[in-house]
Image (spheres, grey):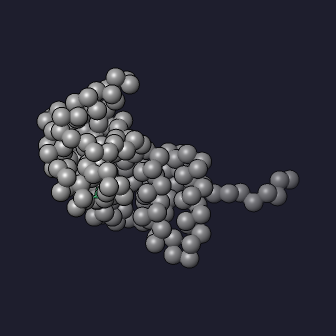
């Protein structure tokens, strides 16, 4: 006779299992660690950051999955992601362009550089180019004020950028693809 206790799988367990299947082992380990917190709900922002760091943005599907796993209402998760502008709900381009608009860069003409980038790519702040190569954003001081104006493209930081240097600069990244 088999005396093993039967584990009853409830519909809720199934939903959670399906939700967990959407994440990598690394992300799941992070979520599980956060769930050990005496107040796991306080870890929601950390979990969302982790998910975004892997995907570059937060899809509705992943947000709902986080809600299921952490047993937090989906509306609350969605509310947090729209409240904090650090969360992106749309996929980003291969290269995120961050134009520093901190004081030093602003004084040295960052606004003109930003305008030129917008013209060249035909996009505004927060938008992604049609070829999915660039997403444009603003930054507040990239910590290189002596090299102002500063523009970060992907991992690369470019110093003393002027509007006339913008086309060639963008071309470098276009040619990499
Ligand atoms: S203000 Fe732009 S790097 Fe500091």
- Residue closest to the eye, 6 or 126: 126
In this picture, residue 116 sits left or right of residue 146 = left
Give percent across and percent down for residue 62.
42, 49
Asked if 156 appears above or below 68 in the picture, the reply is: above
Tell me the residue at 75%/60% (across/down).
5
> Given the current orientation, which residue lies at the most extreme right position?
1
Let me know if residue 93 appears in the view: yes
- x and y percent of residue 170 in the render? 27, 31
Residue 39 position in % (x across, y down): 51, 75
**Rendered residue at 28%/64% (across/down):** 83
Closer to us: 15 or 86: 86
Rendered residue at 22%/61% (across/down): 103
User: Is residue 12 visible to the viewer in this orientation of the structure?
Assistant: no
Relative to 15, 121 lies left or right: left
8 left or right of 152 in image: right
Which percent across, then down, holds residue 35? 56, 66
Query: Splitting the image into 4 quarters, where does residue 171 fall?
Result: top left
Q: Which quarter of the figure has residue 177?
A: top left
Residue 67 is drawn in which quadrant?
bottom left
Residue depicted at x 35% and y 38%: 95
Q: Relative to residue 50, is residue 166 depicted above or below?
A: above
Ligand 1 - quadrant of the structure image = bottom left
The number of numbered badges drawn on the structure is 0
């Amino acid at each position: 006779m088999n005396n093993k206790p039967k584990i009853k799988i409830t519909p809720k367990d199934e939903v959670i299992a399906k939700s967990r299947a959407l994440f990598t082992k690394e992300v799941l380990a992070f979520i599980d660690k956060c769930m050990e917190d005496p107040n796991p709900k306080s870890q929601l922002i950390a979990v969302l950051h982790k998910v975004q760091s892997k995907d570059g943005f937060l899809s509705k599907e992943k947000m709902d999955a986080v809600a299921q796993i952490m047993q937090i209402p989906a509306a609350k998760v969605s509310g947090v992601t729209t409240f904090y502008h650090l969360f992106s709900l749309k996929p980003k381009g291969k290269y995120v362009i961050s134009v520093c608009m901190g004081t030093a860069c602003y004084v040295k003409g960052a606004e003109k550089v930003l305008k030129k980038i917008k013209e060249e790519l035909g996009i505004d702040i927060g938008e992604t180019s049609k070829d999915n190569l660039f997403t444009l954003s603003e930054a507040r001081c990239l910590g290189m004020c002596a090299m102002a104006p500063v523009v970060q493209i992907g991992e690369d930081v470019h110093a003393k950028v002027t509007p006339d240097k913008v086309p060639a600069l963008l071309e470098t990244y276009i040619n990499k693809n």
